[in-house]
Amino acid sequence: MTVRIGDMTFADWVSLEYENGWTDTFIFRISARACLPPFDYAPLLKRIVAHTRRKRASASIWVQVDSPGEWFAKEVFRSLKGLRLPYAVTRSDQKPDFLDFSLRPWMAHASSRHPPIVEEKPHPVSHEALSCLRALGRMTKGDEQEVASLAGIPFDVAKSLLHELEAKKLAVYKHGQKDRGDQSKPAHMDLFPSWHLTRKGVSLALRSWGAPRNTAFDSRLEENLYQIGSEHRHIARIWPAWLKSAWPQAEIWTGWSEVGIPGLSVIPDGLAWGRIQGYETLFWLEVGDEHKTKEQILEVTRTRLRQAIQLSERTGVRLVFSLLSSPWVHEAARWACTNLPDDVAVVMGERRWFGELPVMEWGRVTE
């Protein structure tokens, strides 16, 4: 039941009863499989909260995360540090305890007045088609294989759905303008056509993520957009599908390319999340740069592995660190992968062989 406070909307509202009274709590819902990493929502929620505080000083926020594992919700909570309202983050099937709130929520002796209800319009597309919209909403543009991988659906299904979205004027297949890393350089068109969202398609994707109308949500976008169309970016985007093909026994819940992660100074080319051998695991991808010297490769790999371990340790999940490149790059990078923790595995594969990875072993490097 969507509710409104001023210009902001929330998925629902509830007055939670605790020992000392009743809260005035607005609900924001997140799906871990909505094609966005957990870190992307914080800037949006901070904008929503800034407006909500002015309109309803008694408000608190309950972020409900629909998630198959623990890591996603933990990172959402961590990313919201400094939010200027009491907030709690739980799995969608769990009611927050009073102590789950970041700050003591405002309490009343009786249930607060219900905020205005907004008429809900059902999504005009299927859940799988919405996943394609969301994937493109983060990518800005991409091909069928990339959309299928990041949406978590089979290639043939994604290809058919993209044409359905085009018929509904939500997506379009066209040549686009290249994103420029250096704005002083002249603009160029992409060499090949790709799928883009129309303005209507972007709007639908934004609403599905809980973004109110006219509220900026640029944090959803991939980092380094100027690399779109490169082989490097293509490999990063098909990383979830690569893992599913290489290790069918693993559960790959979702994944993203070019993820900016708070607290880290490096950006993984790809990051997937799932379960392998019974352990909740992050699958960090680096696509090797064959234009660097061996010394540079060693230093870059050492830095990125260290920060990948830092990311996994802060929420207690395991890590598979993967390098896709040529054999001479693997040889140089191996020297950065010594003394691995028992809950970390490093695998090295050939970037030209889609869907192939060596068997992983905890605490070891395999290639």
Image: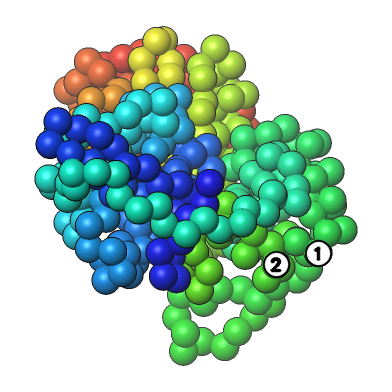
Direction from residue 237 to residue 11 in the image, left or right = left
- Location of residue 291 by image quarter: bottom left
Residue in the picture at 40% in, 64% down: 5
Task: Single out the residue that lies furthest toward the front.
Answer: 110
CB of mark 2 within 8 Å of CB of mark 1? Answer: yes
User: What amino acid type should be assigned to the residue bearing mark 1?
Assistant: Lys
Residue under label 2: 200
23 w.r.t. 83: above or below: above
Q: CA distance from mark 2 to mark 1?
A: 7 Å
- Please name whichever residue, 1 or 171, is drawn nearer the observer in this view of the structure: 1
- The residue tagged with tag 1: helix, strand or loop? loop
Query: Does any portion of residue 146 appear in the rendered image?
Result: no
Query: Does any portion of residue 135 appear in the rendered image?
Result: yes
86 w.r.t. 56: above or below: above
- The residue tagged with tag 2: helix, strand or loop? helix
Residue under label 1: 169
Residue in the picture at 75% in, 51% down: 124
